[in-house]
Image (cartoon, grey):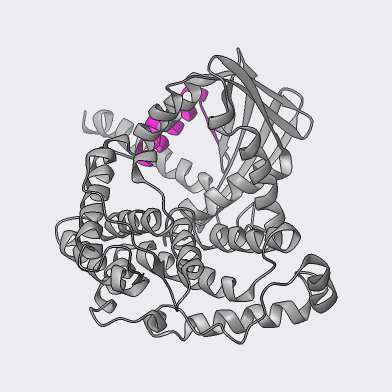
Amino acid sequence: MFWLLIAPIVAGVLALAGAAFLAVDNYPRIAGKPQLTAADIERAMRVLEQHDPRKLKPSTQQTITVSQQDLELALDYMASRLGRGAVRVVLQDGAARIFASAELPANPLGRYVNVEGRVTEAAGAVRIGGVRVGRVPVPDWLARWLVVEALERAGATGAYKVTTSAVKRVSIADHRLSVTYEWRADLADELRAAVIRPEDQERLRAYQAALAAAVGVGRPGSSATLAELIAPLVRVAAERSMKGEAVAENRAMILALTCYVNGKSLAALVPAAREWPRPQHRSVTLRGREDFAQHFTVSATIASGAGRSVADAVGLFKEVDDSRTGSGFSFQDLVADRAGTRFGELATSDQSSAKKLQARVGARMRDSDMMPAPDDLPEGITEADFKRRFDGLESPKYKRLMAEIDRRVATTPLYR
């Protein structure tokens, strides 16, 4: 009787152990780290400009078309950010084959999990099927449940539901993905509410109030240094982190500061901010220049949300674009960009790093503690002059200069 009762349990445990053994591998099927470039950002900017919500009319349908290369790059970057993984995509008529690998924590079974699956068109949407984890097939219903669970754990369920509610048709053709959606007047507000959670709104309110107190000390219309504003805000973040999450506090602090420095209202992100304390206007400088403060804070915000690679690529794209039609390519601006990126990266990479940065920022911090001196670096370079002097972004001369900028940032007191 004992063996009749215990045998099914032992068999079940052995089956699970066998499935786990077959699901885990010693080597990744997909390897590599995505490298975003200024050209990648430029293509993304073109798509965003075509689908700017301010230009869309309600109840009209729009179609976004993405190449296999750009879709794969976006998914690959997300995988690397979320779990040290990599993704490859093959778009065919009516279906997409997706291959992914992720590194696992130390365990006796293996170092990597390799996943493959198939996404097909289905009644205007998509359907997931044919999923295999290692050598183990996964039932379609379980695969779909796992996707929903992953969205829930990532806090993206709300944004996913709002986005998919607007989608009318998905078309997968040879090497491209097209999504047709219907723009609604309330869609932007719904997305904002889904992305910026109530607890994040409360954090933003706290830092807007701290900013109002900080800038209210000086004479109206006078300027302030970025260090003078960051110090009291980080002090508030450190106090709030004692009972909360340091990464979330730092991210909200950086976003509130960035909006203020760049003359943008938080009400564009959180309509309720119209009723919050409003800081008086003061120009903010970094090493004596307003544009340095703007570059620094924007890069910090991008790095805190999307990572260093995106922040660096966006900063480089801005300078390339300026070399064509604006004030010219500026290596001095890139110093501010890289310093801001490093600040945002240290402030939000993990809880330990977030608290360490909070401890480093003191009341006597100066601009020179945050950004190295850039005065000896060239700026105002036109596109033609850049090609003549540096022969493109892949030249050894350009890379040496960027390495020098990174060295200076790394030796700045706040980032040592």
Judge whether 188 appears above or below 291 on screen: above
Magenta part of the protein: which range?
136-158
- Which residue occupies the foreground of this view, 28 or 268? 268
Placement of the C terminus among the 4 image quadrants: bottom left
Which image quadrant for residue 1?
A: top left
Q: Residue at x 51, y 72 (%)?
A: 336
Is 359 situated left or right of 104 in this image? left
Which image quadrant for residue 359?
A: bottom left
Does the image show residue 101? yes
User: What is the x, y in percent for residue 237?
Assistant: 23, 62
Is 330 situated left or right of 12 in this image? right
Residue 139 counted in the magenta span: yes
Is 39 situated left or right of 299 in this image? right
- Which residue occupies the foreground of this view, 415 or 372? 372
Which image quadrant for residue 123?
A: top right
User: What is the x, y in percent for residue 312?
Assistant: 58, 64
User: What is the x, y in percent for residue 241?
Assistant: 20, 61
Residue 155 counted in the magenta span: yes
User: What is the x, y in percent for residue 401?
Assistant: 67, 82
Judge whether 260 appears above or below 138 on screen: below
Q: Residue at x 28, y 39 (%)?
A: 274
Judge whether 176 appears above or below 331 on screen: above
Judge whether 293 appears above or below 15 on screen: below
Is 190 situated left or right of 89 in this image? left
Does the image show residue 103? no
Q: Main secondary structure of the magenta part?
A: helix
For the image, the number of numbered tags is 0
Q: Residue at x 22, y 64 (%)?
A: 214
